[in-house]
Image (cartoon, rainbow, N blue to C red):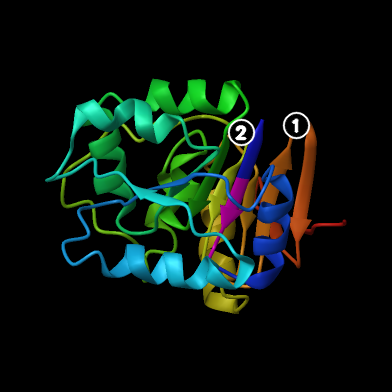
Amino acid sequence: MKLVFYSKLNKEVDLEFINLLRDRNAKIGYIPSATDESMFYFKELKNYYKKYHLKNFLYFDLDKYYERKRMKQIFDCEALILSGGNTYYFLWLIRKRRFASLLRKFVKRGGILVGISAGGIIMTPNINTAKVPSFDCDENKIGIKNTQALNLVNFEFLPHFKNNKRYIEEVLGYSKKSNFPIFACSDKDGILINENKLIFVNNPILFFNGKIYKVFH
């Protein structure tokens, strides 16, 4: 299993991700959390990765411009990137297109799945961290009640974490209700899984059962 969790695109996680790729000409699929009408974010992503000589990107829309006939093309990619955005809407789209089982099969056969922010949350057992902290959370406008997600790992992921008292108190409170450890990542942090190896980039913080722990790596 090869998974990459970005809070936000950053050099340290980039280098770990690139090490997972067989070569720089690998096809990389980009799956946005909602239709990117102007392709702004897709173009921004492609420009970002140019410095690493990655340029073989495919855009696949689960929303307004969904084309089922392109399904094989996207799953022929070596890596798939799940974008940031509204986590609730993204999960709703994945369910609507019956895409979850296909993503799990992609990972099982050795594909690299990359989640940026919301995309990373989607890769965990549930998307409950999308509501944490309450003062800086995603809106559940789509009305999702079942928050189960891809369940590829046995932990929860909290992106954009800020190491201050207000954030810490909310995450500690949530951790008392969760059945899973929670890895909180600032925008400089990240997490990778390469087969059975768990790799921490910079300084994620672990919250579990109302307690806070430093991650050693």
Query: How many residues crowd around disc 1 within 10 Å: few (fewer than 14), some, or many (20 or more)?
Result: few
Residue placed farthest to the left in the image? 64
- As measured in the structure, the alpha-carbon distance from the residue carrying label 2 to the one carrying label 1 is 12 Å
Which residue is disc 2 drawn over?
A: 153
On screen, 184 above or below 64? below
Give the extent of the magenta segment: 4-8
User: What residue is drawn where x is 31% and y is 39%?
Assistant: 91
Residue 110 quadrant: top right
Percent across and percent down for residue 55 are 49, 59
Residue placed farthest to the front in the image? 25
Q: Is residue 8 visible?
A: no
Which of the two residues, 162 or 87, is positioned nearer the viewer here?
87
Which of the two residues, 6 or 209, is positioned nearer the viewer here?
6
Q: Amino acid at mark 1?
A: Glu
Percent across and percent down for residue 201 are 74, 61
Percent across and percent down for residue 190 are 65, 59
Which residue is disc 1 drawn over?
A: 195
Quadrant housing the C terminus: bottom right
In the rendered view, does 33 fall on the left or right side of 66? right
Label 2 or label 1, whichever lies nearer to me, is 1
User: What residue is drawn where x is 37% and y is 64%?
Assistant: 134
